[in-house]
Amino acid sequence: MRKFASYLVALVLANILTMTAFAQNVTIGGTVKNSATGEQAAAVSVTIKGTDAGTFTNDKGRYSISAKSLPVTLIISSVGYTAQEIVVTSASQNIDVSFVPNNALGQEVVVSASRVSQKIMESPVSIERISAAAIRNAPAANFYDIVANLKGVDVTTSSLTFKTPTTRGFSKSGNTRFNQLVDGMDNLAPGLNFSLGAVIGLSELDLDNIELLGGASSALYGPGGMNGTLLMTSKSPFKYQGLSALVKLGVMHTDHRQRAASPYHNWNVRWAKAFNNKFAFKINAEVIQAKDWVASDNRNYKRLGSLGNVVAGDRKTDPNYDGVNVYGDETTGDIRAVFGAIAGGIPGAATFITTNGLMTNPINVSRTGFTEKELVNPNTVNFKLAGSFHYKLSEKTEAILAAYWGTGNTVYTGSDRYSLKDFKMGQYKLELNNKNWSLRGYTTQENAGESYNVTATTRLFNESWKPSPTAWFPQYAYQYLSSRMSGMTDYDAHQAARIYADVGKPLPGSPAFTSAYDAIRKKPISAGGGLLLDKSDLYAAEGNYNLTSVTKSVADILIGANYKQYKLNSEGTLFADSTGPISTGEYGAYVQATRKLAKFLTLTASGRYDKNQNFSGRFTPRVTALVKVGNNSNVRVSYQSAYRFPTNQQQWINLVVGSTRLVGGHSSFVQYLGTNTNPLYEAESVIAGTPKVIAQTALKPEALNSFELGYKGLLMNSKLLVDLYGYYGQYQDFLGRTNTFQTTTGVAADITNSSKRRGISIPVNSTDKVKTQGFGVSADYRLAKNFVLGANISSDVLVNTPSTVIASINAPKYKGNVSLGNTGFGTAKRYGFNVVYKWQQGFNYVEDFANGDLQAVQTLDAQVSMKLPKSKSIVKLGANNLLNQYYYNAIGNSQIGGLYYISYGFNVY
């Protein structure tokens, strides 16, 4: 008791002394203005030199900071301005600052390259950064379109709100080789296994900056960073305060090619408030509503194992037509199988069949399908809500409690075409940030809502109104045979047979169609419908500590560790979890050491170890060297490694898509499929008539070793910024899928009988090394009067991929863009503009859904803007794909047209 009383007295005395000291503090305040325009400069850093004390100007350009005594030196700084130091000897009057813009290139500070703050010019690896100012001035309705302008970046557009970026190849909807982090949290949906990007994430108003690490980045950021890591950071309510609003109103489908012209709406509001630089909060919300782009690739697709391809023909000319974006026509059959059953009901049929050789060659016929426009609700809605509380425990330590939640409708292309309807995902975190360390715990909660498999639902819908084996195919065969016997040509007989078999087909949009289709899409996949019941979760904890203050004499050392626990819960509609949720855990730790060996040479070495409970642990090293070859000119050399464990879907999926069942690579599937006694055969070998048993081996993590040489420098009196890189990468145990067949009877000889076998797609590791190489070059030139000219070009080439592995090698050999912009000209520098021309070469696209050639793409984006300083507003008129040249960048994805908009932003900074 006495000991407790002593502690209590000491605590009270400490608080009294603290309050006394606080009462003796001197408060310094003032206003910071842009010297060129006279506008208040918001979000400007104001610190006391030699201390950790600091604050930011608010939305009115005002600041207030406490000093223990005078005199002190204030440091006023912000990207895009010349830093100033002001000696304060008296606090009796405001210390106002005229802040001078310098618009210098290459002055940004980045964190992601080494997990510590450093100038972008001194980054030891390739990195790109997009600031809040760049986002504000970009000719883009969505910030993912800005990422697409960076060198070496490919973006796959599945729909208006679902865009997937990647670097160095392997572009696809939902790229599992590319990490996306939002405020330090993995943005991956635990069940879907990929990031949903703008569907669930930060709003434009709350986005402070984006950093992109191209290529291997697992050493610091963990599994998955094979092709890069994108880090998105939101705005601090201490730095960015006040009420902000952004409204974009536009129009799409102006040429009526896909549907009638329709409006585009985007409302975004943010409010942040700080109290005495101690406590702050923010809340922001965004709503996007529009009629989505349409996937309308009606080309005929021939499915042959993993080597399917686009072929000639359409519904009228090919009885076995299977349109890329036509669903329900995947159901196919050889009508010769029912000739015998119906011949007895048609006098002379048996003789006619024999005489005309109708049993000689297959007569494959597919069900009549429906287009995506007839099936999927075009109304895309995206709603995001986020907020956070921030409390400074001390000048060095800040506590953050944050929540990010979103819901919406979108579509994407995986193994089939999927409609994410009323999809919901929330991320919630508690974080402690110190000058030298950080701790973070967060959870991701996923709810698939009414999301469904469009392809599977439509096939089942066809079966609901007329079953294929007992009605549709027999009716088709009967009418075909009767028509041929009456003297019709083969072509006319097929047309007549389809009309006859399709009698009773509900008309799209009719009450009968909607009622029957909705009944199937709302029924779980496990119960014979198309509905996904995914409610998977992720729980994560991580931390890092910068030991530099202790180890400075030896090296700058950073250590960190993390833990993740996945809880997969799809009730048997996506994973093999019909008996209950599946839990999977993984953990990792890393260490990084940086030492400056000479004035011109800095070496950094890092290593990371990760372990997944289903796989052996993996170690990934990274070594970099930064060589200073001149003032603001640096050469960088690096060896980087990356890896990824097979995704949750690659381990546990159990889903029928089209005519194939996708299964995972977990060892339990060997027993489930019974492959010990009923083996799997390579699909290509079966189709070729030489069945070959495929040897199943345990699935292993995929690894990448990458070597890179780069240069970044400021030339021509710092007016020209040049950045270039070249890389070579080698993948080992490359993860892909291969298609197989298995008999349904257990009799090996039946593998050649299409009616007695089933298709099964399994994940596999390539036994061959997959190699990749490429380069990227960018140049930005600052002209007079705030004009900036930019250009970049990049190349990615991947080789040595086995034909039996679907490896997603999806990148143009060459791509690039050219831009011209100005952030302030005319009266009081109120006007601005930006124009970006993008081009990419055509290439062959390979993916689970379909393979085929993509044409070259050219787009032009533009915007003009005008500032209204008195109301702290900006008006912008812009267009994405100004020339309205429709394109798509993945087989089966939506075709993207022009989006024209006008926006009004209040207090956007």
Image (cartoon, grey):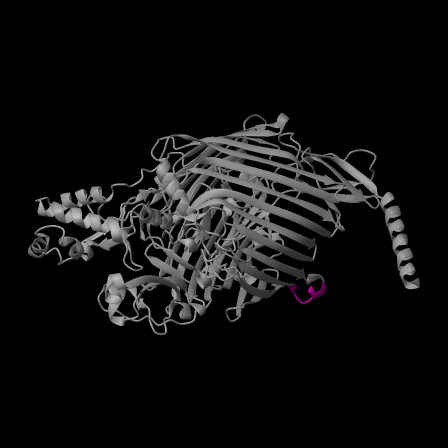
| x, y percent for residue 319 | 21, 48
Count of picture labels: 0
The quarter of the picture where residue 503 lies is top left
295 or 122, which lies in front?
A: 295
552 part of magenta stretch = yes
State which quarter of the image contains the C terminus. top right
**Image location (x, y in percent) of residue 451:** 45, 47
Q: Is residue 124 left or right of residue 507?
A: right
Q: Return the residue nearer the eye: 530 or 735.
A: 530
The answer to which image quadrant residue 112 occupies is bottom right
- Residue displayed at 74% across by 44% down: 279
Q: In front here: 839 or 71? A: 839
Residue drawn at 57 percent across, 53 percent down: 444
Magenta span has 2? no
Q: Which residues are magenta?
A: 550-557
Q: Position of residue 879 (x, y in %)?
A: 44, 33
Q: Which residue, as the protein is rendered here, is positioned at the far front?
A: 345
Left or right: where does residue 448 sit relative to residue 50? left
551 relative position to 578: left or right: right
Q: Is the residue 69 above or below the residue 592 in the image?
A: above
The image shows residue 63, relative to residue 741, as above or below, that is above
Residue at far right of view: 2
Q: Quadrant of the N terminus?
A: bottom right
Residue 310 shows in this picture: no
Q: Is residue 172 visible to us here? A: yes
Where residue 687 appears, as percent x and y from the top left, is 24, 63
Left or right position of 75 against 206: right
